[in-house]
Image (cartoon, rainbow, N blue to C red):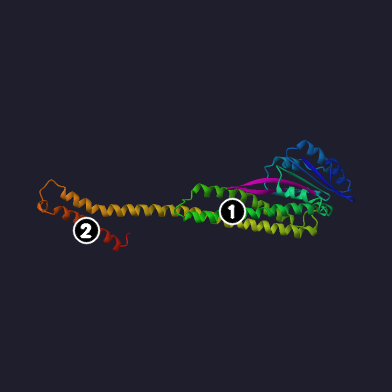
Amino acid sequence: MIRAWLVDARGARESDPAEAASAAVEGRAMTWIDFTDDDEEQALAAIRPFDIHPLAIEDMFAQVNRPKVDNFGRYLYLVLHSARWNEDRPTLREIDFVLGERFLVTCHAGEPRSISAAHEIMPRRPELLAQGPSRLLHFVLDVLVDHYMPIMDRISEMIDSYEEQLFDRRGMLANQRILHLKRGMAALRRILGPQRDTLLALTRDEFHAIPADMRPYLRDVYDRLARVHDFMDSFRDEVATLLELQVSTASNRLNEVIKRLTVVATVGLPLTVVTSYYGMNFQFAEYGWRYGWAYVLGLLALTAGVTWWFLKKKRWM
């Protein structure tokens, strides 16, 4: 699907992509052309007037790029990723931008929420594009970074929940669940680091396509993404600690079980000696007593009690 917005003296309106591209190249309007990577042939025909470098076009439809910014003089080629958290791992979507002085081209898979928000707000706020495509780019990036914060909240809740389950004897926490969370966080961190550096590069004064008055706004977006990256570093340490606690807790529980079994075996050992003694094929005097059986049972109870008292006194149980 290809959608094009055009802003000129008559206001903002959706337009034919070819008309929007021609108007931008001729300097008659500001335009935004948005398409998915499934519409390659139609998209190439629509953006041909912009004379975009073949390498940028190739990367645009590859959908395997890490976050980056390339300066082609008249325009910038920018790659960023949106994120959505599903259960215990993120779903990442690449968004490619080509930013010129009078046009913005976006390419993506699916329908990222930041792009959808931009389409919804364009009829109400045409100044986003009328004041230059860099302002529309800022809006998209602002919404994109805002959607990272709920992910941080979700990860924080999961870590807190796992910590509570870790010390709950009724529900043993599986290592697999922690490992899934760790892998999901690692996938997100691989994107956040380069994405933070990419946004930082946009705040510098080396790009002609971004006017000076937009850099403070982009710096604000960078600050929030840097905060998200700091959260991820903190969460990584917490998950590593959680894994160590899981192993330590399992070891402690095993030690407790072994300790109880050892107490049972220790208490039973003297009883085995007594019963073995009286179980020999010899005639003992106690056999002739009237209450000899009571004597033996009492001896067994006394032996068990003394052993228990000794273990308690030594604080071995």
Q: How many marks?
A: 2
**What secondary structure predominates along the stretch shown in magenta?**
strand
Secondary structure beneath label 2: helix
User: Which residue occupies the foreground of this view, 166 or 248?
Assistant: 166
Point out residue 68 in the picture as x, y percentages from the top left corner: 70, 49
Q: Which residue is mark 2?
A: 302
Quarter where residue 306 is shown:
bottom left
Secondary structure beneath label 1: helix
Mark nearest the camera among 2 and 1 is 2
Q: Residue furthest top?
A: 41
Q: Are marks 2 and 1 in contact (CB under 8 Å)?
A: no
- Indicate whether residue 84 is drawn in magenta: yes
Classify residue 119 as left or right of residue 177: right
Quick one: quadrant of the N terminus? top right
Classify residue 255 as left or right of residue 108: left
Classify residue 242 as left or right of residue 29: left
Q: Residue at x 65, y 46 (%)?
A: 92
Quarter where residue 260 is shown:
bottom left
Label 1 amino acid? Ile
Q: Residue furthest bottom?
A: 313
Classify residue 251 as left or right of residue 163: left
Q: Which mark is residue 155?
A: 1
Point out residue 195 in the picture as x, y percentages from the top left corner: 68, 52
Point out residue 57 in the picture as x, y percentages from the top left corner: 75, 41
Point out residue 172 in the picture as x, y percentages from the top left corner: 46, 50
What are the residue bounds of the magenta stretch?
Answer: 79-99
Label 2 amino acid? Leu
